[in-house]
C-alpha cells in the first residue's frame, strides 16, 4: 500500500503521529494554493493557517476508495476553506490565472469530446493543456463550473440522466465535482452492455425483472451480471 494511503488509514483511526506526518508532507500543497490568493489584504501566514485547516479536513474526510490521489482531493478542500474565509469580508475574486486555466480546460474538454467522441478524463485534459490534475480541480472549483453538474451521465432511448439528479442535496460542491469525475471514470471503463445495465438499474431505477425484459435476458442473468459489474467497479475504484 502506498505510504500516503497507509498514513491516511492510520490518521483516520486516531493515530496523531500519522496525522502530523500527513500534514507535514502536504504543507507544500497549502503554500502552492495560498499563492493563488495573494494580494487580497491578508497576511500570507493567516491564509496559510486557514488553508491548513482545509488540509486537516481533507485528511479526515478522504475516502480511500476514491480513484484519485489524495492531493487532488485536498486541493478544493484547502482552496474552499480559504475562499470561505475571504468571502466573509466579500473579498474573494477568481484570479486571472485561474480564469485562464478554466478557459483552457473547457476548450480541451470540448475538443476531446468532439474529436474522440467521449467525455474528457482528467488525464487527457492534463496532457492537452499541460495543467496538473491538482490545478485542474482548483480551476474548476474556482470558476464555479455549474454546468458540469448538468452534464448527461447516462442516455438511452431519448432519456437523459444528469449528474445533478443523482447528487444528494446539501453535499459540498467540491465533493460533487470529484464524485462526478469518479463516476465518469468508472463508467468509461465499462462495456456498452454493462453501461446499459447499470444505467437502467441505478439511473432509471428499474427492477432486475424490468431490466431483463429490456435486455432480452433472464432475471437471473441480470442479477449475475450486475453483481459482476459492481465488483469490477469497486475494484477499479481502489
Image: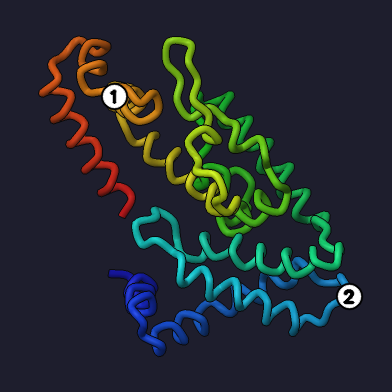
Which quadrant, please, contains the C terminus? bottom left
- Image quadrant where residue 195 sits: top left
- Residue 174 circle label: none
Residue closest to the eye, 146 or 189: 146
Q: Position of residue 27 (x, y in %)?
A: 58, 80
Residue at (74% x, 71% y) in the render:
35
- Image quadrant where residue 90 sits: bottom right
Image marks 1 and 2: residues in contact by CB distance under 8 Å? no
Q: Secondary structure at mark 1?
A: helix
Residue at (53% x, 27% y) in the render:
152
How many other residues sit within 10 Å of disc 1, few (<14), some (14-19) or many (≥20)? many
Residue that sits furthest to the bottom in the current view: 17
- Residue 41 circle label: 2
Residue closest to the eye, 227 or 182: 227
Vertical arrangement, residue 162 with respect to residue 41, above or below: above
Residue at (39% x, 34% y) in the render:
188
Q: Position of residue 108 (x, y in %)?
A: 63, 37
Residue that sits furthest to the left in the current view: 220
Q: Earlier in the sequence, mark 1 or mark 2?
A: 2
Q: Secondary structure at mark 2?
A: loop
Residue closest to the eye, 98 or 171: 171
Q: Position of residue 216 (x, y in %)?
A: 20, 10
Q: Position of residue 102 (x, y in %)?
A: 71, 46
Vertical arrangement, residue 148 with respect to residue 210, above or below: below
How many other residues sit within 10 Å of disc 2, few (<14), some (14-19) or many (≥20)? few
In the image, 224: left or right of 172? left
- Residue 197 circle label: 1
In the image, 55: left or right of 59? right
Alpha-carbon span between mark 1 and mark 2: 54 Å
Tag count in the figure? Answer: 2
Which quadrant, please, contains the N terminus? bottom left
Amino acid at each position: 500500500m502506498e505510504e500516503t494511503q497507509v498514513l491516511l488509514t492510520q490518521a483516520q483511526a486516531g493515530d496523531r503521529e500519522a496525522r502530523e506526518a500527513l500534514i507535514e508532507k502536504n504543507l507544500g500543497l497549502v503554500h502552492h494554493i495560498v499563492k493563488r490568493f495573494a494580494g487580497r489584504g491578508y497576511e500570507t501566514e493567516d491564509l496559510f493557517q486557514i488553508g491548513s485547516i482545509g488540509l486537516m479536513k481533507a485528511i479526515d474526510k478522504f475516502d480511500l476508495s476514491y480513484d484519485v490521489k489524495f492531493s487532488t482531493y485536498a486541493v478544493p478542500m484547502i482552496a474552499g476553506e480559504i475562499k470561505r474565509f475571504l468571502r466573509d469580508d466579500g473579498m474573494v475574486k477568481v484570479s486571472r490565472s485561474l480564469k485562464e486555466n478554466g478557459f483552457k480546460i473547457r476548450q480541451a474538454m470540448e475538443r476531446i469530446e468532439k474529436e474522440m467522441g467521449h467525455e474528457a478524463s482528467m488525464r487527457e485534459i492534463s496532457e492537452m493543456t499541460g495543467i496538473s490534475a491538482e490545478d485542474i480541480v482548483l480551476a474548476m472549483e474556482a470558476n464555479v463550473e455549474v454546468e458540469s453538474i448538468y452534464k448527461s451521465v447516462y442516455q438511452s432511448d431519448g432519456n437523459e440522466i444528469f449528474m445533478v439528479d443523482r447528487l444528494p442535496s446539501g453535499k459540498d460542491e467540491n465533493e460533487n465535482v470529484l464524485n462526478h469525475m469518479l463516476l465518469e471514470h468508472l463508467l468509461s471503463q465499462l462495456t456498452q452492455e454493462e453501461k446499459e445495465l447499470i444505467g437502467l438499474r441505478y439511473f432509471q431505477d428499474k427492477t432486475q425483472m424490468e431490466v431483463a425484459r429490456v435486455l432480452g435476458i433472464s432475471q437471473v442473468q441480470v442479477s449475475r451480471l450486475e453483481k459482476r459489474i459492481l465488483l469490477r467497479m469497486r475494484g477499479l475504484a481502489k
